[in-house]
């Protein structure tokens, strides 16, 4: 086969590849559909990137509709998924990864060299058209690498959605519990104020000692301080929730329910929780995808370790008075000083780093599942203990003391002392109930954002 025929076939091949390379374009959804499907399947929520003013107006309308009534935990999660700017910024990772994918599917720009030489009456013109053969040969493999990375980024962004949902749900329960504590602290403070006033009157007429009067005064002072502490904690919890919801201005005046949801009748029993988490968690899936991508990248580096530059060029020279000269040139970097061992070693180190990160992620996930389920059961048992034992017993004692006070068997001091002890029990139940809902959210997050279908309510 003549060199000219070889050159023609090469040029045709290059033209075909150029045509195929030019077909690499962006997708319509930018990789967002898979993220939206995961959010819908695991959370039952809608996610939407803000790419235009129409998107922003539609999201604002949805948020105003949700804020028109007291927020539920699900409403709070939906608002955060639509309005949190950090999450919207995270969506940009999809665009970056897709741009890299499209770029990897396109050939490098060819080079054109033109030389004009005048020698006496003669004129020599040299034209050379070159392009990188390494880029041409490795184009499919580079595209596969970027495709794998793109898939990993989709999982990472989806996992970011699940994390924000879990954080918002926990912040919601903390805010509601803090608000509930404020209401109860104010009720206690009002009762303490009445007790202190009663103590002052009884002391003035000589029916109470100075010691008894001081006890009521200090209880009133403590109750006042408790209101201040509760209000501070409520503001902090509400602001934390507001930040996650991405609200500002008048939107921050959203309403929360007065009390936490009731404790479920029975706790959840999860079978094969660790195995479910390993298969369901998106951070593990993303780590697997990244490790597979790095393995492919390592193979590519080993393949091209000796070749950094391999350019093929078409040459066409004209010289006045002589026939036109055509041909081709091949430019290859000679690996004398750099055999590519450093690049291979770096790729191997990055790959092993990813393998160990994957193993660490799996081990941590298993541990998180065990820890979160233990925390969930402990929180449920404690809240149920308060609900079924401590609070009813305390109320029963309070009712008995009231009967005895009405029968003049105990003094006002004893009745007020009993009220102080009841405060601790009610606050303990509020905190235990809040811890339960937070623990349930942690369990769901440890399992990958949703609970398995094989749930059981049998103890």
Image (spheres, rainbow, N blue to C red):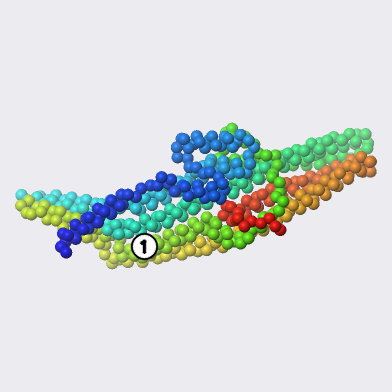
Q: Answer whether residue 418 is visible to the viewer in this image.
A: no
Q: Residue at x 76, y 49 (%)?
A: 387
Q: Residue at x 39, y 61 (%)?
A: 297
Disc 1 designates what residue? 300
Label 1: how many Cα within 10 Å (few below 14, some 14–19, many 20+):
some
Relative to residue 411, is residue 375 drawn left or right? left
Residue toward you, 342 or 149: 149
Q: How many marks?
A: 1
Residue toward you, 215 or 91: 91
Q: Residue at x 78, y 51 (%)?
A: 388
Specify the farthest residue to the top. 250
Relative to residue 390, is residue 207 drawn left or right? right
Q: Position of residue 268 (x, y in %)?
A: 67, 55
Local secondary structure at mark 1: helix
Residue toward you, 109 or 59: 59
Position above or below: 378 against 221: below
Position above or below: 399 against 282: above
Q: Position of residue 315 (x, y in %)?
A: 17, 55
Relative to residue 214, is residue 97 drawn left or right? left
Q: Residue at x 15, y 62 (%)?
A: 2
Q: Position of residue 159 (x, y in %)?
A: 52, 52
User: Which quadrant is home to the C terminus?
Assistant: bottom right
Q: Position of residue 433 (x, y in %)?
A: 71, 48
User: Which quadrant is home to the N terminus?
Assistant: bottom left
Q: Answer whether residue 330 is visible to the viewer in this image.
A: yes
């Amino acid at each position: 086969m003549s060199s000219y025929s070889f050159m023609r076939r090469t040029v045709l091949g290059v033209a075909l590849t150029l045509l195929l390379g030019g077909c690499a374009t962006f997708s319509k959804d930018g990789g967002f559909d898979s993220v939206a499907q995961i959010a819908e399947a695991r959370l039952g929520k809608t996610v939407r990137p803000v790419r235009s003013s129409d998107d922003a107006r539609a999201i604002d309308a949805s948020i105003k509709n949700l804020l028109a009534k007291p927020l539920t935990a699900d409403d709070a999660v939906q608002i955060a998924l639509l309005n949190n700017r950090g999450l919207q910024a995270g969506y940009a990772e999809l665009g970056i990864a897709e741009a890299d994918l499209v770029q990897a599917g396109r050939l490098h720009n060819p080079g054109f060299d033109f030389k004009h030489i005048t020698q006496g009456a003669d004129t020599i013109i040299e034209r050379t058209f070159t392009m990188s053969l390494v880029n041409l040969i490795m184009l499919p493999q580079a595209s596969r690498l970027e495709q794998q990375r793109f898939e990993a980024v989709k999982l990472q962004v989806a996992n970011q959605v699940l994390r924000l949902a879990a954080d918002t749900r926990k912040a919601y329960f903390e805010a509601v519990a803090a608000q509930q504590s404020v209401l109860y602290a104010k009720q206690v403070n009002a009762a303490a104020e009445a007790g202190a006033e009663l103590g002052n009157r009884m002391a003035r007429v000589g029916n109470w000692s100075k010691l008894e009067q001081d006890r009521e005064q200090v209880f009133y002072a403590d109750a006042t301080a408790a209101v201040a502490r509760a209000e501070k904690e409520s503001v902090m919890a509400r602001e934390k929730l507001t930040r996650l919801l991405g609200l500002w201005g008048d939107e921050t005046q959203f309403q929360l329910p007065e009390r936490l949801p009731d404790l479920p009748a029975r706790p959840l029993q999860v079978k094969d929780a660790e195995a479910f988490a390993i298969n369901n968690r998106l951070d593990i899936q993303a780590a697997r995808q990244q490790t597979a991508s790095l393995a492919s990248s390592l193979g590519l580096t080993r393949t091209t370790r000796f070749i950094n530059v391999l350019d093929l060029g078409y040459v066409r020279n004209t010289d006045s008075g002589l026939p036109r000269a055509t041909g081709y040139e091949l430019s290859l970097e000679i690996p004398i000083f750099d055999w590519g061992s450093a690049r291979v070693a770096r790729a191997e180190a990055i790959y092993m780093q990813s393998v160990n990160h994957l193993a660490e992620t799996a081990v941590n996930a298993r541990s998180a599942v065990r820890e979160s389920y233990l925390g969930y059961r402990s929180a449920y048992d404690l809240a149920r203990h308060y609900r079924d034992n401590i609070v009813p017993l305390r109320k029963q004692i309070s009712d008995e003391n009231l009967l005895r006070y009405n029968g003049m068997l105990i003094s006002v001091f004893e009745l007020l002392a009993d009220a102080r002890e009841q405060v601790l029990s009610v606050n303990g139940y509020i905190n235990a109930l809040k811890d339960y809902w937070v623990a349930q959210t942690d369990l769901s997050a440890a399992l990958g954002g949703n609970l398995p279908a094989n749930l059981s309510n049998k103890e």
